Image (spheres, grey):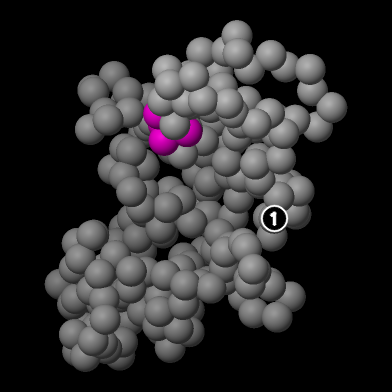
Amino acid sequence: MFKKNAVAAGMAAFASVALTAGCAVADGSKGSDADISEMSADELAEHLIFETDSFRDQEMQEGGDWADRMTQDELQQACSMKGDPDGETAGEVVAMARASYEAPENLELGDWRKGAELADSGYGYRMGHKNDDHSQRDPGGNCYNCHVFDPEVSEQGTIGPSLENYGANRGDGEAVRRYVHEVISNPHQYFPCTQMPRFRDGKEQLLTDEQISHIMAYLLDPESPVNN
């Protein structure tokens, strides 16, 4: 149960309270004859999320609708647990991540200036009253939300490790470039069940290889403020 979405636990708790207290729960199904009084809390939560009008019938930027976005793929299902994964699960996640990764034809660095813009931009896949429109503006990486890059930038995150002086400390060899590309594309190859998004090899492609090359340049180019 609830391999499909990330908010199901909260919905299940709500459903459990509602059923235990004898509260009426509106069905809202599209022509459904489902008898919610016969459902467990978990079944009711899944029903409310995926089989009713709980989410808008609205197309996502990556295609599909709300329910498609909330449905987990195999890797997300494997990582749906409390705490860190056990050894077996971690190995399975790493294997899935590496199987989905395809190396680009070349690992040339892009423009670090464009990489800085992408790292700072959180534009991309927000839905609601003011949707992100990809025909007007390209998605960003929102990297500043989790990492420190440039010490001169005032607002940066600390969820992930600091990347200050990344290229200065590691150099710019082919092995370093490949590792950086692999981690940005699908970080589960090295960090199973990490909170970092799969920017290229997930359910949808959040960043293109060209965009990733710009972020790589921001990290590795000696002229980048990350390394000065």
Residue 19 part of the magenta segment: no
Q: Residues within 10 Å of mark 1 (few under 14, many from 20)?
A: some
Q: Residue at 53%, 46% (x, y): give it.
A: 202
Q: Quadrant of the C terminus?
A: bottom left
Question: x, y percentage for residue 2?
Answer: 50, 25
Q: Residue at x 69, y 14 (%)?
A: 35
Residue at 49%, 56% in the rendered image: 199
Residue wearing tag 1: 60
Task: Where is residue 20? Give x, y as percent.
Answer: 42, 17
Of residues 163 and 35, the one drawn nearer to the viewer in this rendering = 35
Question: Which residues make up the magenta segment?
Answer: 9-13
Element type at marker 1?
loop
> In the current view of this chain or complex, which residue is farthest to the left?
169
Residue 204: image location, x then y, percent = 60, 50
Picture mark count: 1
Q: Residue furthest top?
A: 38
Q: Nearer the viewer, residue 107 or 157?
A: 157
Query: Of helix, strand and loop, which mostly describes the magenta segment?
Result: helix
Taking the image as shown, residue 50 lies to the left or right of residue 31, namely left
What amino acid does circle 1 point to? Answer: Met
Image vertical order of residue 93 relative to residue 33, above or below: below
Look at the picture and state if 1 lies above or below 49.
above
What residue is drawn where x is 36% and y is 41%?
189
